[in-house]
Each structure stands twice: as structure tokens, then as C-alpha cells.
Amino acid sequence: MKQGIFYGMKENLMIQFVYPDYELPQEYKDVINTIDHGDIVSSLCEDDELRKNADVVICHDWNGIQFSSFDKDRIYTLRTSKEDLFDRYKLLKGIISSSLRLNVVITDIEKFTEEDFKKYKEVLEYLSDVLKTCYAEGKSPQLNLLTDRMMLDGMNNCNAGVENITLAPNGKFYVCPAFYLSKECDGNEKSLDEVCQKGYSIGSLKEGLDIKNPQLYKLDHAPLCRKCDAYQCKRCIWLNRKTTLEVNTPSHEQCVVAHLERNASRNLLTNIRKYGAFLADKEIKGIEYLDPFDVLQK
Ligand code: SF4
């Protein structure tokens, strides 16, 4: 960890620590506190103090969403499967209206079907109504799925492999935590050790960073994405790699989900303007497609 911090200082990087659920020994905390950093902590973390002061709290648990109290100055991230989201999205009302920001991360976008796209549109319409009510009451909470696109003038993607890299506990670098943690490699389930040794490492603290074809991670080398205006899209490199075997080529599912969010953001912007001059300089134009690949084919 000390070497990782030193590397971050040398390269002038902002460091974010992703914590385990158990409390770290004081010795670790002392090392972490030698540098300015961000804390990403699970809602299940046993370290109360850390959880209360975290920059981002990750919720893996919908039951927690129902019964927890939320801090209006804190950012929460909910990781959920699409099925759970479709079953329980109405529970998000409480957290949206009582926190600074909620990020919803759907962990199995690649499994969306045409039927799921319709359901997702309904979910977004419901959440849009929740936000509209908040705005009408003078509050301005953020929900990544709907409010990010309203505020953006250009792409704001994850940028893994370009602006962000992950240093794993094994001392190796990865494009993002998914490349380190996933047990799937080319569609076949492998052990974590196997994937770590074989798979996706892009260097180590010892040998330095070594990203093969680094240009492929950049927006200007992503032919579909560079012309797209779903600016809030994560443009998930891991999902691209998993679904199309190309880090710079997205799947149909990722694009349609992002465009449903984009279009719902457009409707939300129109609706909240009934209550005031919100984001007067922003405009999201109407479009006829949900997957930019369809336009490219024409
Ligand atoms: S919606 Fe598709 S084309 Fe647009 S940025 Fe996202 S992944 Fe790229």
C-alpha cells in the first residue's frame, strides 16, 4: 500500500480507497491517512466511523435501502440486478429525496431483453416523477440515471484505462476493479487466481504501467461513442470487452439503456421547467433511435 501511495504521488494521481467490510487495523489507517484521498465504503462495513464519513457509500442490499436512514450530504451508490430494480424501484423514492446523490449501477445490463427495455422506461418515468416533485418543493437531489445528462455538455464516462486505473491487493494494475474481480474470462468461468495471473493485469508496481494499445480506451478511438450524445453513459469498457470482445465497441443493451436514460432526462428537463428556469442554457434534442448503431447502418 505504501508503494501504491508513493506511485500515486509521483504520477500526481487522486487516490480512492475501496474498503473491505471488516475494520482495518490502525496501522493500515495510518498509512492511508498519509495522503489526501477518497473513501468508498460498503453500507455493510463494520467500521461505523469510516462508514459515517465515507465519500461514497455502496449499498448492495435493497433491505438496507428500505430501513436505513440517509445523510443529506452524502453520496450513495446502489448496485442492483435488473430484476431487483424492476421489483423494488419504488423504494428509491426515500433515498432520492433524503441524500445528496444516488448512483444506481445495474450489474447485468448485458442481460436486458426487449421486454426489459419497456420495463426500464417505466422505471425511469416513475423516478422522473419523484425528482420532479423534489424540484417543485425546492430540493435538487441528483440521480445519475436522470439528472447527469441534463447538466452535461459533453461525454462524462467512466474513463477507465484513460483517467482511472485500479491497483489491486496483489500489487498489479487493472483497467478497473471488474477486470481484477471478475471470474469470467472469454465466457468461461475461471478461478480468481487464474484470471489474475493470466488475464487482465496491465502492469504492476514493480514493473510499471503497461497498457497495450492505450488509444483504444480513448473516446476518439470509439467510432460509435465519439458521435453519441448520451453523455451520461458509463461507456463501460468491461462490459464492451465482455459482450463484443472489443474494449471500444459497446453492446446493443448498453446503448439502448443509456438512450432510454437520455430521453427520460430530456422529458424531466421539460417537466421541471414548469416550476422555474432550470438549466436555461441546456437543451437535449429529440432523436428517433435508441441504438446509434442503427443510425450508422443507414
Ligand atoms: S450509448 Fe452507446 S454509443 Fe453512446 S456513449 Fe454509450 S456506449 Fe457509446
Image: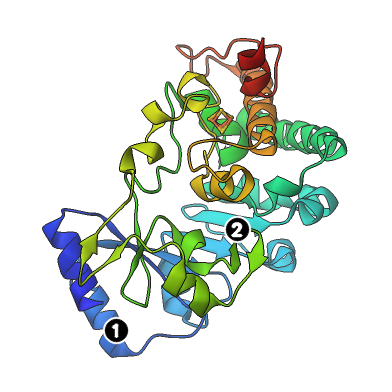
* Residue located at (25% from left, 55% from top): 14
Amino acid of disc 1? Tyr
Viewer-nearest residue: 130 or 27: 27
Q: Picture quarter containing residue 115?
A: top right
Say whether residue 235 is visible.
Answer: yes
Is tag 1's residue or tag 2's residue first in the polypeptide sequence? 1
- Which residue corresponds to mark 1? 28
* Residue located at (53% from left, 44% from top): 236
* Residue located at (22% from left, 54% from top): 13
Say whether residue 271 is visible.
Answer: no
Where 55 falls versus 93 (above or below)? below
Q: Picture quarter containing residue 265?
A: top right
Residue 280 % position (x, y): 48, 12
Tally the marks. Answer: 2
Q: Residues within 10 Å of mark 1 (few under 14, many from 20)?
A: few
Quadrant observed for ligand 1 in the rendered image: top right
Viewer-nearest residue: 103 or 244: 244
- Which residue corresponds to mark 2? 186
Q: Is residue 226 left or right of residue 161?
A: right
Where 267 falls versus 180 (above or below)? above
Q: CA distance from mark 1 to mark 2?
A: 36 Å
Q: Which mark is residue 203?
A: none
Q: Quadrant of the N terminus?
A: bottom left
Q: Check disc 2 and report its element: helix, strand or loop.
A: loop
Q: Is residue 85 left or right of residue 163?
A: right
Residue 84 % position (x, y): 79, 56
Viewer-nearest residue: 201 or 235: 201
Residue 258 % position (x, y): 63, 32
Q: Nearer the viewer, mark 1 or mark 2?
A: 2
